[in-house]
Image: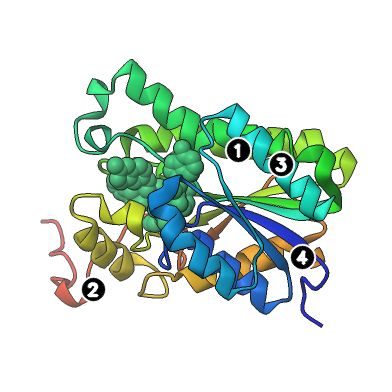
Amino acid sequence: MGLLSGKKAFIFGVANERSIAWGIAQAFHAEGAELGFNFLGEALEKRVRPLAESVGAKLILPCDVSKDTEIETLYKEVEKAWGKFDILVHCIAFANKEELSNPFSTTSRAGFHLAMDISAYSLVAITRPAVPLLNEGGSIITLTYYGSEKVIPNYNIMGVAKAALECSVRYLAADLGAKGIRVNAISAGPIKTLAASGVGGFKTMLKTAGDMTPLKRNVSQDEVGNTATYLASSWSSGVTGEVIYVDAGANIIGMHFDEKKEEGPAAPAK
Ligand code: NAD
Ligand code: 0WE
């Protein structure tokens, strides 16, 4: 018996085999969950469908989370196929490329709105119609990043959107707690995915991040999947409204330097 046997999980945000959502899907599948997936547009359907079918998924539905009508249609299909379900996973973010390289002070109104809509509001947008379909003991999980708390070069408007997302997790958790539904976020360290590969200097960032963590490495999609499995299962039944770090410990570090390059003790003052 797997930890998630008999549970149904709908996962938003698989783009390809490198997606964090796919790491989560594989972990859920290994623990016996039945899975459903969305895809964004026909181009990604070609990638998502074979992956979804490889874990036995039958529910593979189109959905652009900026469109309420598409979300509504998706849940009609979910209800037809499943009735109720147990686990909702949100692994979606988007900002204009320029807004992730130009100075933050030049962020446009439209760019701000877009990033907030796709990366933060979409959690509320896919939660609201899911609530009547979620079983008692249900679990909602989203993905965030440390750039919501401290300044990370170029993360810019995405940092603002992730702060809104994390705060939405707390308000949703307070709201849905009485229904027995928990809501949590995983704050993952940098991982090379499709979204990350669109970012200039990402390779350097991975190297820098890997060097400064207590574990002296980066994290994998599988490690995020394992924490998501804990959050989806009753092992975390007392946990809601939290942000859990899967970042090899990066968030605890206040300053980092290479101790091998140390100059030795400073000369005593005269
Ligand atoms: P990814 O590119 O594999 O996934 C991003 C997904 O967002 C894609 O599947 C894309 O189709 C989807 N998406 C974008 N706009 C959408 C829309 N309008 N409607 C529906 N779907 C839409 O990249 P990823 O790194 O796996 O990202 C997943 C989540 O993890 C994001 O929330 C991201 O912020 C978060 N995250 C990523 C990292 C990292 O370093 N890769 C670290 C921490 C958190
Ligand atoms: O949340 C993310 C990725 C967010 C993202 C990335 C892109 C690139 C391509 C959102 N929208 C877009 N739009 C594009 O056109 N991460 C946590 C990964 C990430 O992205 C960064 C990072 C890290 C880490 C951007 C700048 C600096 C650091």
Whether disc 1's CB lies below 8 Å from ligand 1 is answered no
CA gap, disc 3 to disc 1? 14 Å
Q: Secondary structure at mark 3?
A: helix
- Looking at the rendered image, the disc whose residue lies closer to the viewer, 2 or 3, is 3
The foreground one among 270 and 133 is 133
- Numbered circle sitting on residue 75: 3
**Total labels drawn:** 4
What amino acid is labelled 3 in the image? Tyr
Q: Nearer the viewer, mark 3 or mark 1?
A: 3
Q: Nearer the viewer, residue 191 or 1?
A: 1
Residue to which mark 4 is pinned: 233
Q: Who's the residue at 73% across and 48% down the image?
A: 78
Name which of mark 2 and mark 3 comes first in the sequence. Answer: 3
Q: Do callouts 2 and 3 mark residues in contact (Cβ within 8 Å)? A: no
Q: Is residue 43 visible?
A: yes
Question: Is residue 180 rendered to the left or right of residue 10?
Answer: right
Which label number is shown at residue 259?
A: 2
Q: Residue at x 74, y 40 (%)?
A: 76
Element type at mark 4:
loop
Q: Position of residue 11 (x, y in %)?
A: 61, 55
Mark closer to the observer (2, 1): 1
Q: CA distance from mark 2 to mark 4?
A: 41 Å
Badge 4 amino acid: Ser
Disc on res. 11: none
Q: Amino acid at mark 2?
A: Glu
Dot 1 or dot 4: first in sequence order is 1
Element assignment for label 2: helix
Q: CA distance from mark 2 to mark 1?
A: 42 Å
